[in-house]
Amino acid sequence: MSPRLDLGPWPNLGYAASRIDRAAEKRADAEAMHALEADATARWYVLGGELVAMRKSTSTFDPLFERADAHDLGPAGLPSVFLGMMDGAPRFALSIEAEAMEALKSRDDYEISDLRTIAVRGMVDGVHLPPLAEGKSLLLWHSRRRFCSNCGGQTRVVDAGWRRDCPACKMQHFPRTDPVVIMLTIDGDRCILGRSGRFASNSWSCLAGFVEPGETFEDAVRREVREEAGIVCGQVKYFRSQPWPFPSSLMIGCHAQALSHELVIDHNELEGARWFAREEVASMLARAHPDGLITPVPVAIAYHIIRDWVENGVEFD
Amino acid sequence: MSPRLDLGPWPNLGYAASRIDRAAEKRADAEAMHALEADATARWYVLGGELVAMRKSTSTFDPLFERADAHDLGPAGLPSVFLGMMDGAPRFALSIEAEAMEALKSRDDYEISDLRTIAVRGMVDGVHLPPLAEGKSLLLWHSRRRFCSNCGGQTRVVDAGWRRDCPACKMQHFPRTDPVVIMLTIDGDRCILGRSGRFASNSWSCLAGFVEPGETFEDAVRREVREEAGIVCGQVKYFRSQPWPFPSSLMIGCHAQALSHELVIDHNELEGARWFAREEVASMLARAHPDGLITPVPVAIAYHIIRDWVENGVEFD
């Protein structure tokens, strides 16, 4: 079976396919780092909480600032972090205080928006999304790690933003990356989509949840589908992964084989979930559903997991 | 090409294939939790840092203790955590202080060992390894999270050990799970194995490294192989995942396609790395290498990644 609707060329997955060379060996080298900051091609991304500062230009917006311009935008809440080299040029991210970012919204020459909106609307050239994701996750981690979780002492930034050390108890703290499984549960020509209360009322997507300590991600897929929808899953097939900087998730996209059929919905987690026929899902992807139901935007991995099943199907043993 | 040596039946991957039903919906229900603790079938795993307490019995050792016996082993450093239900019976993990655990080593009726040795030597029935991994990761996380990283205040345990809350700034802290990529880089009938200085001198394994914020795990594979061995990789194929409770990693096992061939080794990370022919690796898996070189034990996912390539090969597009 093939879908009857033409969905067009396959769009890019958001925040993925980074062109940044992280040049991790330079992080601990203070001299090299000073030289990179002073390099004429060095540029800064400027963030503040969920928001990103961009300069208005002709077609898309420009999120890159020279060093002095970046620091002029407002007082830095944190030291800048080294993201790596893009096409040979150093790239950093800097966080300015929330009030300074808010104040920039009234300026005609700047555009201020959150990273999700920037990605969905294509407000910047796509090459900027992965380094913005990298910078946002790192800076948000710093903003919540001023103190040592082991002894309560104040920590300090080392390695160009890639570690925080506790001078008191000597514990080293590394940035978090939280693995999250996100899956489409399949029974032949139908699949389960769910809705969170946070979604628009016509929007349906994959189920998802954090991987917990002590489980494989295949086990995490089976646990989450059973917890949220009451469905027993068998085989789990990995599809693709995606960094998701809200705040620092690693999305692990999968297709899962349904072994049972009766839905038992956990209404603490989901507003609803039901079986959808493949043709109906195809119409949702194409924005042609008779009741206006839709699947997520192509920035999100859910779109790709769903479309891959609709167009190519998934074979389980 | 098939290997000339018979490697026997495929052994189990350590700490994976958990039979625990985490029953996460019960964690926040204090009344349900009290009932589970009082259940006649409830049992506790007793840990202390890297060590696990076991009772000596006829064949393997028994790591399960009744509630009173578990608490008698020594003062608890932390509250016990709820692991879930195994075959309908509640399972918890309790951490006793390091000195109490050391003292138990002199007792004839107990065996005290670290979780890695327990797994490698098969000291307990394999069904206990996943809950022990779950408990060890959780308890170690608690031991280093007494203070709020956001405000420095003291945190308290909630949800039967699955969250810590800060009463001062209201931040909620969740257990960490750190995704780590571990990969075999392949060029037709040869692969790259490396050695860390921490390994026994005859032991060779896959390369590995933490996934960083803002990257897919395929990008993390390519970055790590280039950083550690100077090799450019193309396609990355996911193989299997494994919880690795040292202290709380999620190992993401992959095969990677080599696009370049000249090794440039980062001696800060590796003592050595080189290309190995498939026949040579087969002899290492079979413990029949003429110079006594070996690959990792079957408890580790590296064994499975390597053996899968040796026995089945990997096709890249």
Image (cartoon, coloured by chain):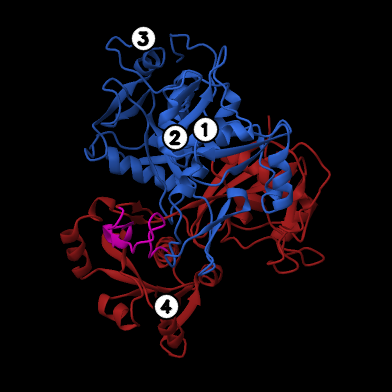
Chain colours: A red, B blue
Q: Amino acid at mark 4?
A: Ala
- Output the chain of dot 3: B
Residue picked out by circle 1: B73
Q: Secondary structure at mark 3?
A: loop
Is disc 3 in the same subunit as disc 2? yes
- Output the chain of dot 1: B
Q: Is A113 rendered above or below residue A290?
A: below
Q: Secondary structure at mark 2?
A: helix
Is disc 3 in the same subunit as disc 4? no
The residue shown at (76%, 49%) is A229
The magenta stretch spans which residues?
A145-169
In the image, B188 versus A316, the foreground residue is A316
Earlier-in-chain disc, 3 versus 2: 2
Q: Is A162 rendered above or below residue A48?
A: above
Residue B219 seen in the figure:
yes
Q: CA distance from mark 4 to mark 2?
A: 55 Å
Residue B131 seen in the figure:
no
- Output the chain of dot 2: B
Earlier-in-chain disc, 2 versus 1: 1
Residue picked out by circle 3: B288
| Residue B282, horizontal then vertical, whole percent | 40, 15
Q: CA distance from mark 1 to mark 3?
A: 44 Å
Q: Is B302 rendered above or below residue A17?
A: above
